[in-house]
């Protein structure tokens, strides 16, 4: 090109040298300004376009972080944990579709819609443009339910979990029991379901038909409790109570033995002795008898109270109570590690009625000791507990084992969960760092599953602290001092082994 020729370049240099010093300084100053502007434009182009491509590549398979609005790490960690529960997100989708709203989805301030938008953004497998999301809309939606939560005061993630579930129950209770005239989707579903039903005649009372608007959220479960007299062994009717999470106390630490999740569950359902309770059956059988010269009017005996799980939820939230009190009455946080596993079998803690016990097939007879002597170490039992010794103080309980074994690379321990009827898989762990007065919540959670994967559970684990997100491992999550555990029920299948 003409302007690139050598003669033209030499002529420009001679002209620059023949000019005065003031002119040369002015020209150099102008060139400096032009160079500075060009550098600033290049930096701006790099900031606006360059990092976005790199960030999208880096964040594929990751999740967005959440902006800390003051002291809202408790809310951010809980949202990340709920986003790892696919059944809860599906329930929110069905729950939101069952109502008709005149507002646009992005401006709908109802709690169910607001929570659904946040959880779907936190569980999407596709790379997102926003690395950090603002969850302040959730606090605004809770204010409509008369919950005024300050973003500048430290709160508890477990308490917020119950605020969300109770508010969703309140919103669900406001729904009409009859389908709205313009709710065509639900009306069409009801017509399709009625066509497939078989009509029959019955002389008994009609049972109420469950409404689509009255379905419970997947964290809803039921506890059973009953009392039995130790004298006459008469059992009272079973009482059912609802629960959204299991709040487990941590038993006392025994020297040399780790605390396991099975110990906490066993302590939760352990029987309780209640003395001086009037027994109607004993009173009837001993009515009119004379004891120590007095006529017996009421017989008081000792009762045994038993607590078990009557209905297990689809999503199980376990809260480990880390608050205790010193002898002076000051609150103290328990810092010890409670061992838990990726898979959790709840068969031992499930209440079985008499009819359910009759329906269950009888177990095969126990083989002789000579046949099983060589296979003792090859057998793997759910929860790591031998049915011959239901001792929950064993170190290998609930698939968890001592940290000494965890550090041994050559050890390959597996537990067979194929026979478990009530099997759950870990989806998220919430951890609190600090003491009772101040601290910080972080979350270990599963990443978004790949659309090509048939399983809703991703093998990739993430560590999330507000707006910071990085990859983690299952072992790192299992080694944490858990405060909240989120499990989701899965179908057991033959040959399912949980390797730790």
Image: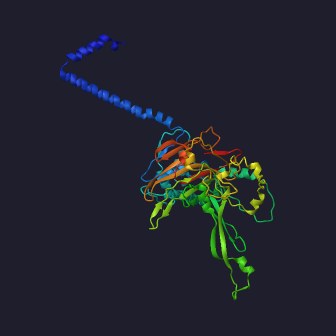
Which residue shows up at 21% across the image and 17% down it?
17
User: Quadrant location of residue 438?
Assistant: bottom left
- Give the left or right position of residue 454, taking residue 254 as reference: right
The answer to whether residue 103 is seen in the rendering is no
The answer to whether residue 452 is seen in the rendering is yes
User: Quadrant location of residue 111?
Assistant: bottom right
Q: Using the image as rendered, state which of residue 389 and residue 360 is in the foreground.
A: 389
Give percent across and percent down for residue 406. 56, 46
Give percent across and percent down for residue 192. 72, 50
Q: Using the image as rendered, state which of residue 362 and residue 2 is in the foreground.
A: 362
Q: Using the image as rendered, state which of residue 422 and residue 34 is in the foreground.
A: 422
| Image quadrant where one finds the N terminus | top left
Q: Is residue 362 above or below residue 203?
A: above
Give percent across and percent down for residue 401. 59, 50
Which residue shows up at 64% across the image and 53% down it?
314
Q: Is residue 6 above or below residue 481?
A: above
| Image quadrant where one finds the C terminus | top right
Q: Residue furthest bottom?
A: 293
């Amino acid at each position: 090109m003409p302007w690139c020729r050598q003669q033209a370049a030499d002529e420009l240099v001679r002209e620059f040298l023949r000019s005065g010093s003031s002119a040369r300084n002015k020209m150099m100053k102008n060139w400096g300004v032009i160079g500075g502007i060009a550098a600033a434009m290049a930096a701006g182009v790099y900031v606006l376009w360059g990092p976005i491509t790199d960030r999208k590549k880096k964040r594929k398979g990751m999740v967005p972080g959440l902006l800390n609005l003051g002291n809202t790490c408790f809310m951010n960690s809980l949202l990340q944990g709920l986003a790892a529960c696919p059944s809860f997100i599906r329930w929110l989708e069905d729950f939101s579709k069952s109502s008709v709203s005149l507002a646009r989805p992005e401006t709908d301030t109802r709690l169910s819609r607001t929570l659904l938008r946040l959880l779907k953004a936190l569980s999407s497998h596709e790379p997102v443009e926003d690395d950090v999301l603002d969850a302040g809309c959730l606090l605004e939606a809770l204010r409509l339910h008369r919950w005024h939560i300050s973003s500048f005061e430290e709160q508890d993630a477990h308490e917020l979990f119950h605020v969300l579930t109770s508010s969703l129950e309140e919103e669900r209770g406001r729904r009409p029991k009859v389908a709205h005239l313009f709710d065509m989707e639900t009306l069409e579903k009801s017509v399709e379901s009625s066509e497939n039903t078989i009509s029959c005649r019955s002389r008994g009372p009609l049972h109420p038909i469950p409404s689509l608007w009255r379905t419970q959220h997947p964290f809803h479960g039921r506890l059973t409790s009953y009392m039995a007299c130790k004298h006459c062994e008469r059992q009272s009717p079973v009482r059912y109570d609802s629960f959204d999470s299991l709040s487990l106390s941590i038993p006392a630490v025994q020297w040399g033995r780790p605390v396991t999740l099975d110990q906490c569950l066993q302590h939760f359902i352990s029987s309780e002795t209640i003395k001086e309770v009037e027994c109607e059956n004993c009173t009837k059988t001993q009515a009119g008898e004379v004891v120590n010269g007095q006529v017996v009017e009421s017989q008081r005996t000792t009762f045994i109270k038993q607590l078990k799980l009557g209905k297990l939820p689809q999503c199980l939230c376990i809260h480990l109570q880390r608050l205790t009190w010193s002898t002076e009455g000051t609150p103290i946080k328990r810092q010890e590690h409670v061992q838990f596993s990726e898979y959790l079998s709840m068969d031992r803690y499930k209440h079985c009625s008499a009819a359910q016990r009759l329906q269950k097939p009888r177990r095969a007879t126990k083989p002789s000791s000579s046949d099983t002597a060589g296979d003792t170490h090859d057998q793997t039992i759910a929860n790591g507990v031998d049915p011959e010794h239901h001792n929950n103080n064993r170190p290998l309980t609930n698939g968890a084992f001592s940290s000494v074994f965890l550090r041994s690379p050559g050890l390959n321990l597996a537990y067979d969960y194929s026979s478990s009827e009530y099997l759950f898989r870990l989806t998220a762990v919430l951890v609190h760092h600090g003491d009772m007065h101040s601290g910080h919540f972080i979350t270990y959670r599963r990443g978004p599953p790949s659309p090509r994967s048939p399983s809703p559970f991703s093998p990739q684990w993430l560590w999330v602290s507000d707006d910071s997100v990085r990859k983690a491992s299952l072992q790192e999550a299992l080694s944490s001092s858990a405060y909240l555990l989120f499990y989701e029920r899965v179908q057991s299948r033959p040959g399912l082994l949980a390797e730790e």
